[in-house]
Amino acid sequence: MTVTVAIPCYRSADTIAAVVAEVKKEILLRDGADYQFVLVNDCSPDDTFGVIRSLAESDKKIVGVSLSRNCGQEAATLAALPFVSGDVCVFMDDDGQHPADEIYKLVDKVTEGYDLVYGRFYEKHHSAGKKMFSRIHNAISEFNGTKIKGVALSSYFALSKFCAKQLVNYRSPFVSRGGYMMAVTAKVANVDISVHRERISGSSSYTFKKMMAMWTSSFTNFTMKPIRAATGIGALTAVAGFIYGLYLIIRKLVNPDVALGFTSIMAVMLLLGGLIMIMLGLLGEYIGRTYMTVSNMPQYVVRETLNAGGDDIRNG
């Protein structure tokens, strides 16, 4: 069996060689096992692709892919898929935090018949802010149905060959990989990973802006729940406004001397105006994403490949 290990790389010139060496050693410990690596340089500003080039020159089973611009981890993940040839594809980070010695927990679970298997860590070496963002992302995904309740998400996961082939067909420029896979298969599971290690070097490149983009994609892709929720809020507000208006009329009829309050009227107008703007913004987000999708905006553009078969460059 061949295990493909796909790694999105960004600012990992000092770490990726050590990660590849450790994972390669672990895979070859099992009898009859072979490996393939697909290393995707997400337009890193350091010499990450130079290191990938050196690795690819020394080992033809290492495929190098360089993107023409920084597209983010989700798009870089998709960029690896057209080059995957293994029976199981494992995705992991480039910083050494994912333990290579537990990779077969993921692989073996896929061979049991699952299509998508996430590693679930007891404790992660992330900042408090990133942990909070992760919890919010999980809650959003569960609310809109793009994540199975109780399944923990992580960037250390494995795909069956079937699921990898299906994911290649995903063309939306607003990438929500997890949501698409949940629409493809219900055979999803977790395996417990004992340790989430410290980084070999460097720090996380996941900024608040990137987190917001991920949340927006999770909130609006593959579901109509947000716009239905907005419709429900609008209906409840209309009912509340009608009841409040009826109350004001009755109060005026009962006591003609009562003056209608300027403050209460302004409060209601501001509330309604704010709700309308939120709903228009949500509707505009859906329309804008639809327009960008039908305009065939790419998820990523490959500038260069190594060991991928001639001059084969495949864009998403």
Image (cartoon, grey):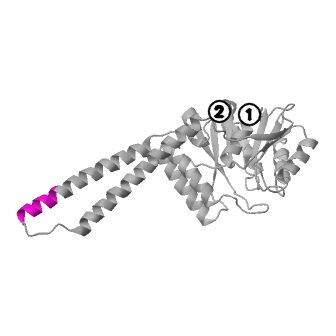
CA neighbours of label 1 inside 10 A, class few (<14), some (14 to 19), many (20+): some
Left or right: residue 284 compared with residue 200: left
**Residue 185, can we see it?**
no
The image position of residue 221, as x and y in percent, is 53, 42
Numbered range of the magenta stretch:
246-254
Residue for badge 2: 163
Mark identifier at residue 279: none
The image position of residue 211, as x and y in percent, is 60, 56
Front position in the image: 3 or 167: 167
In the rendered image, the quadrant that contains the C terminus is top right
Left or right: residue 266 compared with residue 55: left
Q: Earlier in the sequence, mark 1 or mark 2?
A: 1
Specify the amino acid type for callout 2. Answer: Cys
Front position in the image: 238 or 9: 238
Label 1 or label 2, whichever lies nearer to me, is: 1
The image position of residue 56, as x and y in percent, is 89, 42
- Asked if residue 262 lies in the magenta stretch, the reply is no
CA neighbours of label 2 inside 10 A, class few (<14), some (14 to 19), many (20+): some
Specify the amino acid type for callout 1. Answer: Pro
Tell me the quarter of the picture where residue 202 sits.
bottom right
Q: Is residue 200 above or below residue 23?
A: below
Q: Is residue 185 above or below residue 280?
A: above
- In three-dimensional space, the C-alpha distance between marks 1 and 2, rounded to whole angstroms, equals 12 Å
In the rendered image, the quadrant that contains the N terminus is top right
Describe the element under mark 2 as helix, strand or loop: helix
Residue for badge 1: 82
Describe the element under mark 1 as helix, strand or loop: helix
Left or right: residue 46 compared with residue 148: right
